[in-house]
Amino acid sequence: MIHPTVNYGIDSKELEVGGHLGLFYLFEQSLVGFGFEYSSVHSSSYVRKRLTKSEASTSIFFGSYLGKGIYLQNELAKGLANSRDFGFALTVKFVLN
């Protein structure tokens, strides 16, 4: 899956356009995957603090089925700026079949 990301930076007062490239596998009531993000929510000031310090990060995520095509996702992000750059996010994923 490849898709664009758009975030509004509270601190910068600007829209930030980025992208996500990832692979995931759906099975029964769950999903698991990994991805690479550039200027996504991980690295924006959307909540006044970046989840990772770098604009580029990689992540692993696990999701639980909520309803038709909707998953609650736990995500551990690793920024690519330095070895101690980690973040965590709880997100909702919409999967179109």
Image (cartoon, grey):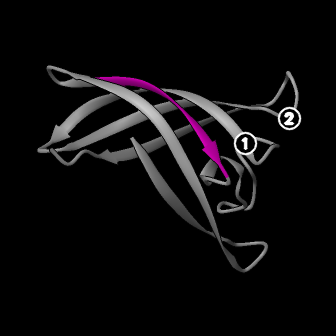
Q: Nearer the viewer, residue 3 or 40?
A: 3
Ranked by sequence position, the earlier of labels 1 and 2 is: 1
Q: Say which residue label 1 marks.
A: 56
Local packing at callout 2 (Cα closer than 10 Å; few below 14, some 14-19, many 20+) is: some
Residue ranking furthest to the bottom: 13
The amino acid pointed to by label 2 is Ala
Query: Residue at the location (80% across, 43% down)?
Result: 54
Q: Is residue 87 magenta?
A: no
CA gap between label 1 and label 2 equals 8 Å
| Residue 46 percent location from the top left of the image | 65, 63
**Image quadrant where residue 14 sits:** bottom right
| Residue 85 percent location from the top left of the image | 80, 30
Query: Residue at the location (70% across, 57% down)?
Result: 44
Q: Say which residue label 2 marks.
A: 81
Q: Nearer the viewer, residue 54 or 11?
A: 54
**Residue 30 image label:** none
Q: Which residues are magenta?
A: 31-38
Residue ranking furthest to the right: 82
Quadrant of the snapshot with the C terminus: top left
